[in-house]
Image: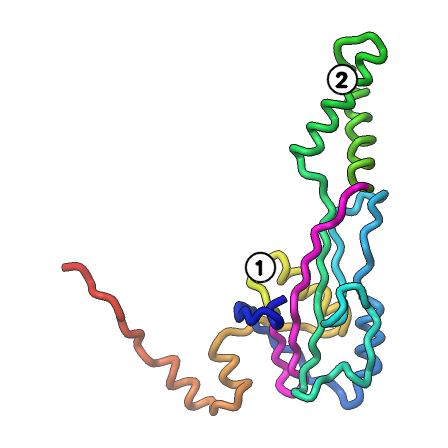
Amino acid sequence: MALHTGTVSYLRFVAPPVEPGFEVKACEALAGHRFIEIDPRSEVDKAHGWVTFDDAFCGEFDPQTLVRGSGHVIVRLRVDTLKVPAATLKAYVDQAARARAQGSGRDRLAKKELDQLKLEVKKQLRVRSLPRLQLVDVAWNIGTGEVRLFTTSKAIAALFVDAFEKTFETQLRLVGLLDVLALRGMAQAEIDALALIDPERFHLIPR
């Protein structure tokens, strides 16, 4: 929740220009790729999709308010992970295995029985568990095409790029500092001059 907390770590991308009046189509596309919660009875461990900036459970977007006064589209990518910790799973499986073995008058279960029991216990624990919820802010300046993703996680960035490109049927380009200067209006000649500047050392070199 970087835009709420003031955290400034982010990755920059550039998207192609949008067509006038794109808001309706964009809202439909966002809703079509909105976040859908994980069914704990399934085998799915991770899910991601779009939600509105102010509601982690809302995947409906309003064309009238999609673009803010600053010229930005601000949304969130929600990423849920539902995975039973290995240590927790082992403890419950061991407990269930002892109870089942004792109930049948044996010291231990056969491997095939133990594997089946592990699947049963995992399903039970998934239903009782809540997913780990992560919200990642996205700010898209439709005037310049600059897109900021407020995380530096490579894994989340990969999910974001895939979701953005599928949603808006376009391609994103990861950019560096010199690219951003061009987006901010700096002349190309000035940018080229910056690239020629030698770095200055601000620490003493041991003799």
* Residue 168 numbered mark, or none: none
- At 63% from the left and 66% from the top, the residue drawn is 1
> Of helix, strand and loop, which mostly describes the magenta segment?
strand
Mark 1–mark 2 Cα distance, whole angstroms, equals: 42 Å
The residue tagged 2 is 98
Magenta part of the chain: 128-148
Mark 1 vs mark 2: in front: 2
Horizontal relation, residue 143 to residue 100: left or right: left
Query: Residue 145: x and y, percent?
Result: 64, 82
Helix, strand or loop at label 1? It is loop
The answer to whether mark 1 and mark 2 are in CB contact below 8 A is no
Query: Residue 155: x and y, percent?
Result: 62, 56
Q: How is colour applied across the structure in the image?
A: rainbow
The amino acid pointed to by label 1 is Ser
154 or 190, nearer to the observer: 154
35 or 15, nearer to the observer: 35
Helix, strand or loop at label 2? It is helix
Q: In which quadrant of the rendered view does residue 91 lie?
A: top right
The residue tagged 1 is 153
The amino acid pointed to by label 2 is Arg
Query: Residue 182: x and y, percent?
Result: 51, 85
Q: Earlier in the sequence, mark 1 or mark 2?
A: 2
- At 78% from the left and 83% from the top, the residue drawn is 65
Please say whether residue 66 is one of the residues in the magenta stretch. no
- At 58% from the left and 64% from the top, the residue drawn is 151
